[in-house]
Image: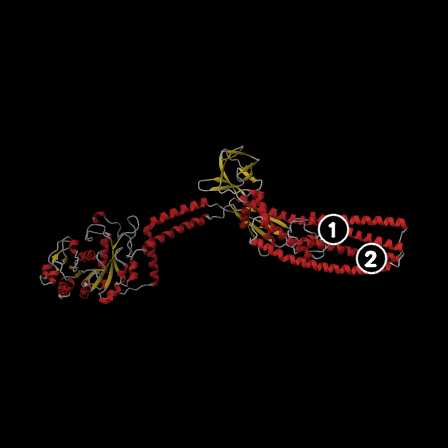
Amino acid sequence: MNIIRKTDETSGNKDAGGHFIFRLLPYWPLFLLLLVVSLASAWVYLQVTPQLFSAEAKILINERKGAEETSIQDPMSSTLSKKKSVDNEREVIVSSPIINQVVADLSLYASVYQNSFLASRIMYEDAPVKIAALDPKGIKPTKSKIEFTYSHSGILIDHKTYAFDKWHQLPYGTLMFRKNINARPSDQSKFAFTLTSPSKVASKIAGGLKVAEANKLSTILVVSILDENPKRAEDILNGVLLVYNKHAIDQYNLLAANTQNFINSRLMTVEKELLDIENKLQKYKSNNGAIDVGTQGKLYLENVSINDQKIGEINMQLSVLDQVENYVRSRDLTGGIVPSTAGINDPGLTQMVKDIYELQLNAESLRKTTGENNPAMVAYNDQINKIKPQILQNLRNQRNSLSASRNNLSGTTSTYSSALQSMPETERNLVDIQRQQQIKSGIYTFLLQKKEETALSYIANGSDSQIVSQAESSQFPVSPKRKMIYLAAIFGAGILGIAFVTAKDKMRRNVMFQHEIQSLTKLPVIAEISTNSSAKQIVIGSNQRTLIAEQFRSLRTTLHYIGMGKQNKRLMITSAISGEGKSFVASNLAVSLAMTGKRVALLDFDLNNPSLHHKFGVKQRTGISEYLQGKASMEDIFSNSIVNENLSLFLTGKLPVDPAELILNGKVEELFSNLAEQFDYLIIDVPPIGPVSDAYSIAPMCDATLFVIRHAYTPKVFIERIDDNIKLNNLPNPAIVFNAVSQRGYGKNNYGYGYGTGMVYGGSYDQKLIE
C-alpha cells in the first residue's frame, strides 16, 4: 500500500509560518541580547546626536509689476519703482549678503559648548560668555574645541586669564569675551568654544534655510530653519527678516541718493547760468532803455522759448544717456554711483540699469566667498553679459530718437530766427536775452520739482514686505525622532537575529528540520524521535512516560498508515548511512509492539556491522548467518528477550565473508515465511542503503520500509536520492522516522528542531519513572 500525502496550499503557508517562528523561539536569549544592545545603541545615538528644533516665521510680500506698469501720478515711479515678485524675494532672502550679515550680527562664527558624559551641548542664551571677533573674516578656524574655565574676572585658557570686554590677541584672531548677564555659571566652571569661518557658517545656514509659499494663492512666505538651539533658530530667522527689510530700504535710499546728487549738480550749473542771464538782461535794459517789446517780438519769444525749453530737456536727457552708457561700459559696475535716469521716459531702461546694478552687487558679494568658476558666479556673469547689450541698444535708440526731435525743434527755431532779422536790433537783442532766461528758468523749475520729489521719497521709502509673525520655535525637538529610532532599533535587532539564525541554518549541509525533509522527498514523516540523553538503549517500558517513550508509542500507532497489520507483518528498517540510529529505532519499536501483547520477532540482518546485541546487553551466539549457511535451524537461532516476554531476538551470529550473496541464496524467504506463522510482527534491521545493497535484496520480501533520518547528521544529498532509490529498487510502502531530534537553543524546556515541545500529554514527567 502506497502512502499519498495531500497538501493544502493555505495550510502549507500556515505551517511554513509556524515552522519559521518555531525555528526562532529557541534563540530567544540571542534576540533578547540583540534587543538590549540595539536599544542601548539607540540610546547612545540619541545622546551623541544633536537635537534639532524647528523654527519658522512668516513674511508678506507686496508684489509690484515694475516701473513700466506703475501710475504716472507717482512722482518717483519712473526712477525708483522696481519689479518685485514672490519668486525673486525668495531668492533674495537666502542670498549671501543677507546671511553673511546675520552671521556677523549674531557672532554665529563662535559657538560655546558645555561638556557632558557622551557629547557636548551647544549653548546660546545660557552661554556664560559671548565671543566677538575684531575681524570675523580673518579668524583662523579651530580644528577642535578650545576648553576654558569661567571665572567672574575673566576666562582661563591654557593657564592664561583673559579679562572681559577687552580685545585680546589669540592664535585664532583678535577676540573679545563679554560676560553674559543672563547666565550665572558658578566660578571655575568648565566650558569650550569653537571658531568657524563666517562664510562656512553662512553656507550652512543658507543650505538649511527653507523658504516656501504658505499656499498657491498667497504671497506670504514661510521661512523655516532647523537648529540645535531653539532660541538661536528664532534669532537667526528674525535676523534674516530684519536684514532683508533693511536691505530693501537701503536699496531704495541708495537710488534716491544717487538721483538727488545728480539733480543737485545740475541745479548748481543751471542756477549760475540763470543768474548770469538775469544780470545780462538787467544791464541791457539799463544801457539801451529797452522797457518792452512789440507784439511780434512777444509771439516770437513765446514760441522760441517753448522750443528752446524742449531742446534743453532733450540735451539733459542726452547727458543722462551718456552717463548711463559710461556706467554700463565700465568694467567695475560697483565702483561708482549708479547714474540717475531722471527725465528719461523709458521705464524699461530704468529697470535694466537697476537690474544690472543689483546683479553686480550680488556677484561681488559671492566673489568674496567663492571662486570665479562657481556655478552661481557663472550664472550672475551670464545675466550681466545678456543685459549689457540690451541696455546699449536701448541707449542708441533713445539717442537717435532724441537727436531727431532736437533737429526738428532746431529747424523750427531757425525759422523764427529768420523773422528776428526784420525786427529792430534793440528789440531783437532783448527778445533773445529773454528767451534764454525763460529756457533756463524752465529747466531750473523742472530740477527743483524733481529735487522735492526725491526728498519726499526718503520719507516714503520703506520695505514693501511685512512680517506677519516673528520666528517661533517648536517646543520639542523634531529630529532625531526618538520613537522612530527606538522602533528602528527593535526592528534591527529582530532582523539581525533572523539573519543570524537563517544564515546559520543555511550553512548546514545536514538536515535540521522536518520541513526540510518534506521539501527534499515525497515520503511522509510518520514519527519524530527525540535524542536519547540517557545511557540506556531501550528507552520504553511499561512504567516509563518519558517524551521519547511516548514518541515510540506514537510510532507504533502510525504503523497502520504504511500497511502494517494482520496480513502485512514484515517491516524493514534501514537508513542512508551508518550511525543514524536505525537499530535503536528497530529495538525500541519492537519493544513497544511487544508491550501490546503481540508476539514480535526482531531480526538483525546487518551482517556487516550488527548492533542489536549491544542494545539488549546480550552476547552474540549462533544466528541468522549460520541459518542462511544451513548450519543451524530456526530453533537454534531463536532466543527470548529479557526486556519483554513477547519479544524474540534473532541475532546475526558469526559475520560471513559474502553477506550479499548469502542473502540471495533463498533461505531468507523461507525464514520470513516460517516466522510469519509464529509471530505477529517481524521487525527486520537491515544495513544502510548507501554503503551496501543488502537492503535492496531483502526489500521485495518485506511489506513496508522505514527510513531512519538523524537530525544534524544525515546529509541532505542522501535524502534527495531516496525517491530515486524507491523507483529503481521498488521498496515497499516507504515512510520516514526523524530520529535524535535534539533540543534547540538555550535552557531546558525549549523547542526542538522538529515539531515537539518537550512535554507529553498529562504534564511533567516523574523523575523517578524516568530513572
Left or right of 723, for residue 322: right
Decide which of 539, 248 is in the foreground and name it. Answer: 248
Residue 383: x and y, percent?
A: 61, 56
Question: On residue 291, which mark appears?
Answer: none
Q: Mark 1 — residue?
A: 450
Q: Amino acid at mark 1?
A: Lys
The crowd level at tag 2 (other Cα within 10 Å; few <14, some 14-19, many 20+) is many
Identify the element where label 1 is drawn: helix
| Position of the N terminus by quadrant | bottom left
Q: Mark 2 — residue?
A: 304
Decide which of 249, 525 is in the foreground and name it. Answer: 249
Left or right of 732, for residue 308: right
Identify the residue shown where x is 87% and y is 57%. Answer: 297
Q: Is residue 55 visible?
A: no
Identify the residue shown where x is 53% and y is 50%. Answer: 208
Of callouts 2 and 1, the N-terminal one: 2
The crowd level at tag 1 (other Cα within 10 Å; few <14, some 14-19, many 20+) is some
| Coloring basis for residues | secondary structure
Of the two numbered discs 2 and 1 in the rendering, the one whose residue sits closer to the viewer: 2
Residue 59: x and y, percent?
A: 60, 50
